[in-house]
Image (cartoon, rainbow, N blue to C red):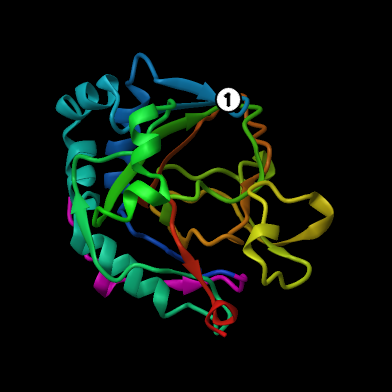
Amino acid sequence: MKIDLDNLNIKKVNAQYPIGYIDNFLSEENCKKLFDEIYAFDAYDDLVMNGRMRVNKGSQKFKNYLKNSPNLFSLYSKLNNQELFLSMKEKLNALKKENSWYPELEDFNFSKEGYGEQKFDLIKYFRKSWFISKFFKKTVNLDVDFSRSKKGYFRKAHRDRDTRIISFLLYLNTIDKKLGGEFEIYKTKEQIKDIAMLKRFPESDKISLVEKFPPKAGQLFLFVSTPDSYHGVSEFLSEKKDRVFIYGSYSLDRKVNWKNQWSNK
């Protein structure tokens, strides 16, 4: 499965944070192959958010499915490399506004084996602490899950975990907008300069909807997972059709240190 991000056009979304999308990131044929492999899963790691079944990197199911899913393995191998991370970072940097938050990330290692924990791990918790982590070089890794959502799935406005640098969403099938499941992009009603005031789940009266996009096969969204990168999913209403997608991020082995023009003054 070929991925050439450098030669693909990214369309900008007019949001507070750097976010854009690429139409036809994957062909319909490749989407169908990936869709079929995910649909064939006979078990998932968890069921979350009122109807999202997912298999997460790091689980035994994930490893087993990759062995028996040549197209997912091919895509995963392309995503799980430093070159694609840097290419995405460069694409998004071109969308950055003057007052955008940006990660402090000058020097790092890239780990193909690392992944975010779905369950609490005491050793890794201390490893990520400021006092301990300052003695270790930062490490970036790919986190990814293969997901299938059913009727009732929704995601209220939020930002992702504070270890994520770049997040991405790849749709494998097209859903009519009447059926919901739209990717929603939000902004704060007022510009917030204090990072401590940017909650992971903002109060509804503090944000407003910028734009929403129904699932479209082969379309890739990517964005910098800034402290104000609020997004969500409208309630999925279909009883006959599942919403199948791949969600991932390039994450640090610790909390990201975010900077802004105000923090340098």
Q: Nearer the viewer, residue 52 or 142?
A: 142
Q: Is residue 181 above or below residue 60?
A: below
| x and y percentages locating residue 15 in the rendered image | 61, 70
Q: Nearer the viewer, residue 169 or 102?
A: 102
Number of numbered tags placed on the structure image? 1
Q: Quadrant of residue 106?
A: bottom left
Q: Residue at x 37, y 15 (%)?
A: 43
Instruction: Name the residue carrying label 1.
Output: 51
Q: Is residue 235 above or below residue 100?
A: above
Q: Residue at x 34, y 68 (%)?
A: 89
Residue 13 shown in magenta: yes
Q: Main secondary structure of the magenta part?
A: loop
Q: Residues within 10 Å of mark 1 (few under 14, many from 20)?
A: some
For the C terminus, the quadrant is: bottom right
Q: Nearer the viewer, residue 95 or 174?
A: 95
Badge 1 amino acid: Gly
- Residue 9 shows up from this direction: no
| x and y percentages locating residue 201 in the rendered image | 68, 46
User: Left or right: 28 with respect to 64?
Assistant: right
Residue span colored magenta:
1-16
Q: Quadrant of residue 116?
A: top left
- Residue 107 shows up from this direction: yes
| x and y percentages locating residue 251 in the rendered image | 36, 51
Describe the element under mark 1 as helix, strand or loop: loop
